[in-house]
Image (cartoon, grey):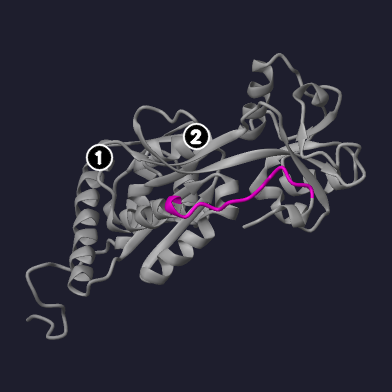
Amino acid sequence: MKDPEAPQGPYPPSSLSIAGLRIFESVARLASFSRAAEELHVSQPYVSNQVHELEDKLRVTLFRRVGRRVYLTESGVLLNRHANDLLQRIAATERESAELRKVIVGRLDLASVVIAAEHVLPHALGEFRLQNPEVALNLQVYNSRQVEQSVADGRFELGVTLSHSPPDDLKAEQFGVDELVVVVGKRHRLASETVIQPETLANETFLVREPTSGTRLFVETKFSAIGITLVHSLELNNNQVIKALVEANLGIAILSWRTVEAEVLSERLSSAKVQGLALERPLTLVSRTHRPLSPPASAFRTILLGTASHPITSNPGGASASDHQE
């Protein structure tokens, strides 16, 4: 005799959960428990426990572990195929339901360099959230090469970089320019200068970012092209610390104008351009070539690229607040 309270219908009850399948799919796609945990914003032990529970429920082994990477077993390949199909159907159902309500749902996965994350994206993301309150936001900060790699391998749908030449498998759309300036303390002998000759900087001591920094590589390449090698006394991995040391007159630096604008306008630091040297980098939005954007990514792209028609004007070569007009 059937239990009258048992679930009725054509589909038997399942011990699998959508959340567990999402975790499994992330590990399978990224071939890493730690990278899956980073993508999903959970701990690595939690990811491992969820996968182990899934294996116990199915009574199979889903992954082979080789060093830090994991590979799907035959059972894992089978589950991954069905999991991807199921998750795509769920996403499609959510989109179609949202279309009936004329709203965008889902998740926006965005990778960015720190300068854009601090000074460009907040306004665009604020406008995006205002227009699309049901979209979950995932913003991670990396250097330009890491941003491009994370978009190319599918971990993020969109990326904002400062690269002049993104890889060929990425679509690049420039929407702004980032200008670098020389910054010195108010007691420095160059504090009153608004334009400095490149040769003058050969006699100065610089505070620089770490060797892998995109800003440092860009600056060194530019000066090397005109036969000048800049001397540095200290390497740091934080722009805030560099600015503090420059203010204390312990060296000078070349940083993004966006990074030092507040200190220059408040007359804590002075800035100057380099005569005859264009220290400008394109702000670029990158996405995978020939891959249509999801509705959230497409909506954010429209908002971000719209900022290009409203450029922020400034005068990085000025030395005091009265010299800067907005």
Going by the image, does 21 lie left or right of 252? left
- Residue at (13, 82) in percent of width and height: 3
Q: Earlier in the sequence, mark 1 or mark 2?
A: 2
Q: Quadrant of the C terminus?
A: bottom right
Q: Is residue 71 visible?
A: yes
Compare residues 216 and 275 and report the one nearer the observer. 275
Q: Residue at x 44, y 39 (%)?
A: 150
Residue 307 higher or lower than 13, as above or below: above
In this view, the residue in front, 39 or 67, is: 39
The crowd level at tag 1 (other Cα within 10 Å; few <14, some 14-19, many 20+) is some
Residue range in magenta is 308-319
Disc 2 marks which residue? 68
**Which is nearer the eye, 63 or 205?**
205
- Secondary structure, magenta segment, majority class: loop
Q: Amino acid at mark 2?
A: Arg
Q: Residue at x 37, y 52 (%)?
A: 301
- Asked if the magenta segment contains residue 310, the reply would be yes
Q: Position of residue 60 (x, y in %)?
A: 29, 46
Mark 2 nearby-residue class (10 Å; few <14, some 14–19, many ≥20): few
Quadrant for the N terminus, please.
Answer: bottom left
Looking at the rendered structure, the secondary structure element under dot 2 is loop
Residue 86: where, in percent of width, then height? 20, 55
Q: Is 196 inside the magenta-drawn segment?
A: no
Left or right, 177 with respect to 75, comes to right
Q: Residue at the location (76% across, 56% down)?
A: 321
